[in-house]
Amino acid sequence: MSRTLPLRNANGGNARPQIFSDKIPADDYLLDAYSNAVIGAAEQVSPAVVNLDVHKRGRQRERFGGSGSGFVFTPDGLILTNSHVVHEAARIEVSLTDGRQFEGELLGDDPHTDLAVVRVTASQLTPAELGDSERLKVGQLVIALGNPYGFQCTVTSGVVSALGRSLRSQSGRLIDNVIQTDAALNPGNSGGPLVTSGGEVVGVNTAIIMPAQGICFAIAMSTAKFVAGLLIKEGRIRRSYVGLAGQNVPIHRRVVRFHNLSYEQGVLVISLDKDSPATNSGLREGDIIVGFDDTPIRSVDDLHRLLTEKQIGIRSRLTVIRHTEKLSFTIVPVESPAFS
């Protein structure tokens, strides 16, 4: 059954009639287009995906430390993966999709962003194309590739569920600008690429929420490019260190109003490292940090974001609340020791 409606064009004349059908049109062409997009992306990127078997030092001999995924991103054998896959590895075995196996060299890893770069000496490699994660949109089709539970070249697909998420790394720092997706990930997917329908890598798969379904995360390629560049050049990411442990605490409203503070929350100093910049500055346990130079501080994460390489050796000002007084201390951050 169908019905025809008369239409008018922009000039007021009669336009061609439009036919409305009560039958629902077949969606086969949509499913075919979806399948072709996933197939095309998988075929393009799969040759770059690798499996990483990691061995770590034991008391008497090497022990198997687990496995994960990664992907080649340069023709000369540089591989991007997760830090938690290869951190403190004694030996890394890299398996390509064509069956070849190589010994991998860890150039550097950064637990704070959960990223690492491994190098293999091999020829005829097919690197993945790196894309622009800043152009992603919520709802966009993405494809995840990796080796979950050792099943090589597994492909799953989904959409970008959210952008700009924050994720807690194993070091305790927040990783900002994380991509949330419902493309299924499992143990072993870590370090594999998250790609667009055009085959461009826009993220490094890194984590799942175990009790949940369809909540998975990837480090944005904008972050990965920056970190990978420094790891290749220097083998590490330099950050500032002040030598204190703190926790977020509320500040009494009366104190906030009296000192005209920006937030009703600060960082309570719960311990100080011996001979650290924080100890040498005159800071005490029980102080509440509310400012770093001209930037208000309301959480440990705010402080972490400011303690970058640029602050190393620079005289800075910490503003704290001690009891009900507002005090300022001069502190000179030093380079952060390696994470272990």
Image: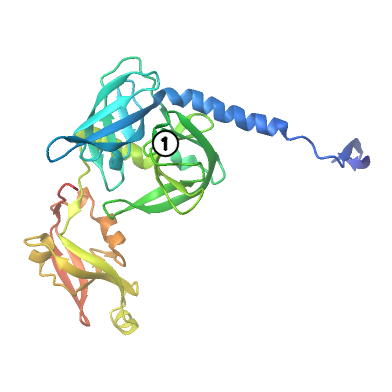
| Residue 305 percent across, percent down from the top left | 29, 55
Q: What element carries label 1?
A: helix
Whether residue 72 appears in this view of the structure is: no
| Residue 255 percent across, percent down from the top left | 29, 82
Which residue in the rendered view is the most extreme toward the front?
60
User: In the image, is 289 to the left or to the right of 193?
Assistant: left
- Quadrant, the N terminus: top right
Q: Residues within 10 Å of mark 1 (few under 14, many from 20)?
A: many
| Residue 166 percent across, percent down from the top left | 39, 53
Q: Which residue is drawn at 28% across and 79% down?
A: 259
Q: In which quarter of the image is residue 9?
A: top right
Which of the pair 227/26 is nearer the observer? 26
Which of the pair 174/46 is nearer the observer? 46
| Residue 27 percent across, percent down from the top left | 73, 35
| Identity, as a three-letter code, of the amino acid under mark 1 | Pro
Q: Quadrant of residue 19?
A: top right
Q: Residue at x 34, y 75 (%)?
A: 264
User: In the image, is 127 to the left or to the right of 64?
Assistant: right
Which residue in the rendered view is the most extreme toward the bottom?
254
Which of the pair 27/68 is nearer the observer? 68
> Residue 139, relative to residue 232: is it above or below?
below
Residue under pointer 1: 148
User: In the image, is 324 to the left or to the right of 11?
Assistant: left
Whether residue 232 appears in this view of the structure is: yes
